[in-house]
Amino acid sequence: MSARAQVEPGVDGIALVGVVDHDSVPELLERLERGAGTGDLLRVDLEEVERMDSAGLALLLELERRQRLAGGELELRNPPASLCRLAELAEVDGLLGIRQQAEADV
């Protein structure tokens, strides 16, 4: 049985914690809808994500879309290497700003 992911409010954004997968994404999306799409910058810290599958990647893409449509933007912090690789394979790393972060870390 996998741990459920959580949304934790932060001073300058939110943090996803635990396993972000096809089981946890529907609930996470419902919780995140309250903060996304406001036209502001939405920062999402991924440092405490234990595992994220393609459903988690789809969640981040949906958040990015909602922010963009509202005139805001999405900033991912501390994306795990596995997410970076998955986003690269799906060719959405640039859309999520992961490519720029990886280059800045070098």
Image (spheres, rainbow, N blue to C red):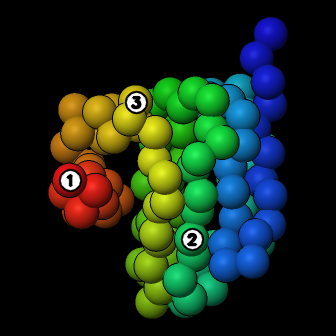
Q: How dense is the environment of label 1, judged by Cα within 10 Å: few (below 14), some, or many (20 and up)?
A: few
Report crowding for label 3: few under 14, some 14 to 19, many 20 or more residues within 10 A (C-alpha): few
Instruction: Say left or right for 13 vs 11.
Output: left
The amino acid type of the residue labelled 1 equals Val
Q: Look at 63% across and 29% down and name the residue there.
A: 50
Mark 1 — residue? Answer: 106
Residue 40 placement, left or right of 90 = right
The answer to whether residue 16 is above or below residue 18 is: below
Q: Amino acid at mark 2?
A: Arg
Query: Nearer the N terminus, badge 3 or badge 2?
Result: 2
Q: Position of residue 90 (x, y in %)?
A: 25, 37
Residue shown at the point (55%, 89%) measured from the top left: 39
Residue 43, label in figure:
2
Packing grade of label 2 (10 A; few <14, some 14-19, many >=20) is: some
> Is residue 5 placed above or below 11 in the rendered structure?
above
Mark 1 or mark 3, which has the lower sequence index? Answer: 3
Per the model, the C-alpha gap separating discs 1 and 3 is 17 Å
Disc number for residue 82: 3
